């Protein structure tokens, strides 16, 4: 009897140990399938300006509701939901206080994610995400089927408010990463830097401010360079050392430089990426340095964020984020020798290469 009882007890003990894990897994999966509620709550808080209205002292829902023009009880429910994720904190007495995450929803925060939060939850996203299975089956973006035109055409033609949010989100993101990039790169021996597809030129401006002996070129689409960082435009503090060059890097890169920077644009289809890299190699001299800066979907602490970005790119433009190996392979194919890959911050990696 003892011999048969012992294995039975052991089995029951093992099942008891597994039960909490199974319960935790079920709870986590339930949380994930309600992820839209969390995203919607963050968006609502950003749109209502809750983080901006909440000062450093905790306040009750009644007072906060008066400041943001909402009903107190629904606002308390919104804040309670967000507090469970660490966005705001609900105190034992029912008042609410800031957390590190909620402060980043403030528009004026140095590391603000206010516009990123809005951009990633824009109205079109709620139409696109439910059709992810179609994009996975076909390998193509589903945006034209939803809205009758390609993604950026839709933004600029039909969704002006969303385009504005996109511009603000990209501006905030670029400003925040520009200093990290400028602090990382060694410009010893560099006289001319070319920022390819560099948007408003925040990275270029940060580099030129740190290195007074360096000149630069910002190449991007005509509408983009027309709105370049004020420091780079006529009359700006750096304008004497900058050329603003309208163009499409997928077509040609008529710029000769010692260093080329390509940040967060190699997320189109692979053929567009190949063309851009080949154009850089064709323009550059042997030994020119090419720094490619991208979010990766491997070897990074931010994989939940970057893999979500990757799926969004599949949905809206048919693009993708890269792994270390896939991007290194495309760069080598174009004639670049990748010497090192270093983290810029938790979200970005820099591929340091030279033209072979």
Image (spheres, rainbow, N blue to C red):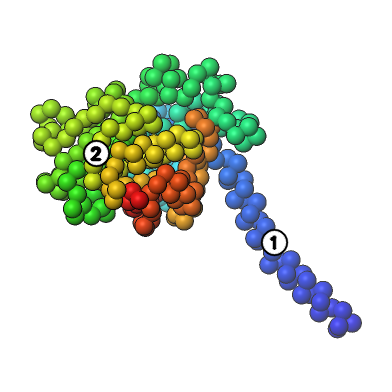
- Estimate how packed mark 2 is, as few (under 14), some (14 to 19) or many (20 or more) residues with alpha carbons within 10 Å: some
Residue at horizontal 57 percent and vertical 21 percent from the top: 145
Q: Is tag 1's residue or tag 2's residue first in the polypeptide sequence?
A: 1
Give the image location of residue 19, x and y in percent.
69, 61
* Residue 319 versus residue 208 in the image, above or below: above
Q: Nearer the viewer, residue 82 or 191?
A: 191
Q: Which residue is mark 2?
A: 256
Q: Nearer the viewer, mark 1 or mark 2?
A: 2
Label 1 secondary element: helix
- Estimate how packed mark 1 is, as few (under 14), some (14 to 19) or many (20 or more) residues with alpha carbons within 10 Å: few
Q: Which residue is mark 1?
A: 19
Give the image location of residue 265, x and y in percent.
39, 37
Q: Quadrant of the N terminus?
A: bottom right
* Residue 37 versus residue 234 in the image, above or below: below
Q: Seen in the image, is 3 located left or right of residue 116?
A: right
Whole-Å distance between the Cαs marked 1 and 2? Answer: 64 Å
Give the image location of residue 161, x and y in percent.
37, 21
Disc number for residue 4: none
Residue at horizontal 30 percent and vertical 30 percent from the top: 220
Residue at horizontal 47 percent and vertical 42 percent from the top: 321
Q: Quadrant of residue 87?
A: top left
């Amino acid at each position: 009897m003892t011999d048969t009882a012992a294995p039975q007890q052991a089995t029951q003990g093992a099942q008891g140990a597994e039960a909490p894990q199974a319960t935790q897994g079920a709870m986590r999966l339930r949380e994930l399938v309600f992820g839209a509620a969390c995203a919607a709550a963050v968006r609502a808080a950003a749109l209502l300006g809750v983080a901006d209205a909440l000062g450093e002292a905790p306040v009750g829902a009644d007072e906060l509701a008066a400041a943001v023009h909402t009903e107190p009880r629904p606002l308390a429910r919104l804040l309670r939901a967000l507090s469970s994720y660490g966005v705001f904190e609900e105190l034992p007495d029912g008042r609410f206080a800031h957390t590190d995450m909620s402060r980043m929803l403030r528009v004026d925060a140095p590391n603000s994610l206010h516009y990123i939060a809005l951009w990633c939850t824009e109205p079109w996203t709620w139409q696109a995400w439910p059709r992810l299975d179609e994009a996975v089956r076909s390998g193509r973006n589903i945006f034209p089927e939803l809205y009758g035109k390609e993604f950026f055409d839709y933004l600029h033609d039909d969704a002006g408010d969303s385009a504005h949010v996109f511009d603000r989100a990209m501006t905030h993101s670029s400003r925040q990463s520009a200093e990290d990039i400028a602090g990382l790169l060694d410009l010893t021996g560099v006289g001319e830097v070319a920022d390819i597809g560099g948007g408003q030129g925040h990275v270029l401006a940060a580099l030129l401010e740190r290195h007074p002996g360096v000149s630069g070129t910002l190449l991007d689409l005509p509408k983009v360079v027309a709105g370049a960082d004020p420091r780079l435009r006529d009359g700006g503090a750096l304008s004497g050392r900058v050329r603003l060059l309208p163009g499409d890097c997928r077509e040609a890169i008529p710029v000769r430089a010692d260093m080329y920077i390509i940040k967060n644009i190699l997320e189109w289809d692979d053929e567009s990426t190949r063309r851009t890299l080949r154009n850089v190699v064709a323009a550059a001299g042997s030994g020119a340095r090419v720094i490619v800066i991208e979010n990766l979907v491997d070897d990074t602490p931010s994989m939940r964020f970057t893999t979500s970005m990757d799926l969004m790119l599949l949905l809206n433009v048919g693009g993708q984020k890269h792994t270390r190996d896939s991007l290194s392979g495309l760069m080598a194919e174009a004639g670049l020798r990748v010497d090192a890959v270093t983290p810029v911050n938790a979200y970005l990696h820099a591929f340091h290469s030279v033209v072979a």
